[in-house]
Amino acid sequence: MTDDDIKFDEEVDITDVVCPVTFVKAKVALEELDDGQILRIRMNDGEPVQNVPRSIKDEGHKILKLTKNDDGTYNLFVRKVDE
């Protein structure tokens, strides 16, 4: 499955912020989606890749895929799950 195979509803770029603001921006973007919609999060390597997916999973959302881009950033695809 490639990034092109995943149809996402919204996207947020958090490459310009540092932890813990990275998770805050991702969480706010998820809160604006409806249950079942998919968010693509573009982030930097390091702390964001280590912390954002774990924190989103801890919130109860489903991590679909994490891929590395040619420029060293990552795309994280998340399906929103309402509790």
Image: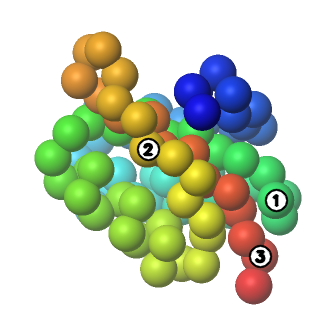
Question: Comparing marks 1 and 2, which lies closer to the viewer?
Answer: 2
Q: Where residue 45 appears, x then y in whole percent?
A: 21, 39
**In the figure, is residue 3 to the left or right of 72?**
right
**In the figure, is residue 40 to the left or right of 44?**
right
Q: Which mark is residue 66?
A: 2
Dot 2 surroundings within 10 Å: few (below 14), some, or many (20 or more)? some
Query: Real-space Cα distance between discs 1 and 3?
Result: 8 Å
Residue type pointed to by label 2: Leu
Quarter occupied by residue 55: bottom left
Which comes sooner in the sequence, label 1 or label 2?
A: 1
Q: Are marks 2 and 3 in contact (CB under 8 Å)?
A: no
Can residue 66 be spotted in the picture? Answer: yes
Colour option used = rainbow
Which element is circle 1 on? loop
Can residue 28 be spotted in the picture? Answer: no
Q: Which mark is residue 36?
A: 1
Quarter occupied by residue 68: top left
> In this picture, is 5 found above or below 12?
above
**In the figure, is residue 14 to the left or right of 77?**
left
Question: Comparing marks 2 and 3, which lies closer to the viewer?
Answer: 2
Q: Where residue 77 appears, x then y in whole percent?
A: 57, 45
Which comes sooner in the sequence, label 2 or label 3?
A: 2
> Between residues 79 and 10, which one lies in front from this camera angle?
79
> In this picture, is 60 found above or below 79?
below
Instruction: Look at 59% across and 78% down and name the residue there.
Output: 60
Query: Real-space Cα distance between discs 1 and 2?
Result: 18 Å
Query: Real-space Cα distance between discs 2 and 3?
Result: 21 Å
Instruction: Look at 55% across and 59% down and name the residue there.
Output: 63
Dot 1 surroundings within 10 Å: few (below 14), some, or many (20 or more)? some
Residue type pointed to by label 1: Gly
Q: Which residue does the numbered mark 3 point to in the structure image?
A: 82
